[in-house]
Image (cartoon, grey):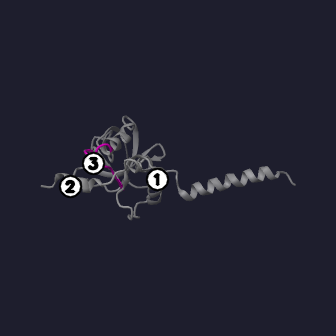
């Protein structure tokens, strides 16, 4: 049989397969782009965080998590639950991968957030707290991971996908209906 037995070769092949799959999926770290580190002060909503930066020249403190939408805070119970999904990030140091270095109309920077090696945007989708902003937008470098996380939550009936009380209206439609004269 040689130096290594069948079981040993099998373990080696399984180990190499796992490494190859992990490398193919690129689950390790975010791609190189503008990155910052900050401490989470609190969650303003299910997709916006108030941050404390250590850099004095960074004036923008709200960060909008890219590629995801959250129920409006007034959409009970989903809005408050979505915000609560990010509450555990309070006082955590996160890494931000900026989508654009210019703030939006609400003075927020859009970014992918990382806690350790986990993509916060994806974790929120996987918990059923948020939904993809545009499921057809494949330009996100994390599109496949985000789509997979959302579909997993939908199939499992988590959060906004719960079969007995699903979110039936997007935040945008809710605001248009609620605030129109």
Residue 72, label in figure? 3
**Classed neighbour count for the residue bearing mark 3: other residues with Cα under 10 Å, few (<14), some (14–19), many (≥20):** many
Residues at marks 3 and 2, CA–CA distance in whole angstroms = 12 Å
Residue 31 visible in image: no
Residue 15 visible in image: yes
**Classed neighbour count for the residue bearing mark 1: other residues with Cα under 10 Å, few (<14), some (14–19), many (≥20):** many
Q: Nearer the viewer, residue 58 or 103?
A: 103
Q: Residue at x 60, y 57 (%)?
A: 21
Image quadrant holding the C terminus, namely bottom left
State which region is magenta.
66-77
Residue 69: in magenta span: yes
Q: Earlier in the sequence, mark 3 or mark 2?
A: 3
Q: Residue at label 1?
A: 149
Judged left or right of residue 82, residue 26 is right
Q: Nearer the viewer, residue 122 or 60?
A: 122
Q: Secondary structure at mark 1?
A: helix
Dots 3, 1 in contact, CB < 8 A? no
Q: Earlier in the sequence, mark 3 or mark 1?
A: 3
**Classed neighbour count for the residue bearing mark 2: other residues with Cα under 10 Å, few (<14), some (14–19), many (≥20):** few
Image quadrant holding the N terminus, namely bottom right
Residues at marks 3 and 1, CA–CA distance in whole angstroms = 21 Å
Q: Earlier in the sequence, mark 2 or mark 1?
A: 1
């Amino acid at each position: 049989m040689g130096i290594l037995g069948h079981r040993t070769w099998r373990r080696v092949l399984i180990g190499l397969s796992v490494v190859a799959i992990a490398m193919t999926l690129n689950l390790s770290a975010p791609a190189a782009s503008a990155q910052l580190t900050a401490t989470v002060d609190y969650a303003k909503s299910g997709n916006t965080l108030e941050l404390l930066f250590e850099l004095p020249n960074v004036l923008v403190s709200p960060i909008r998590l890219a590629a995801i939408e959250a129920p409006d805070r007034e959409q009970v119970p989903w809005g408050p639950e979505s915000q609560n999904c990010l509450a555990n990030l309070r006082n955590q140091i996160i890494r931000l991968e900026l989508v654009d270095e210019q703030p939006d109309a609400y003075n927020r920077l859009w970014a992918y957030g990382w806690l350790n090696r986990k993509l916060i945007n994806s974790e929120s989708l996987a918990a059923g707290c948020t939904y993809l902003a545009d499921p057809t937008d494949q330009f996100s470098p994390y599109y496949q991971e985000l789509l997979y996380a959302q579909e997993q939550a939908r199939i499992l009936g988590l959060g906004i996908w719960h079969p007995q009380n699903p979110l039936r209206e997007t935040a945008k439609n809710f605001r248009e209906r609620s605030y129109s004269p």
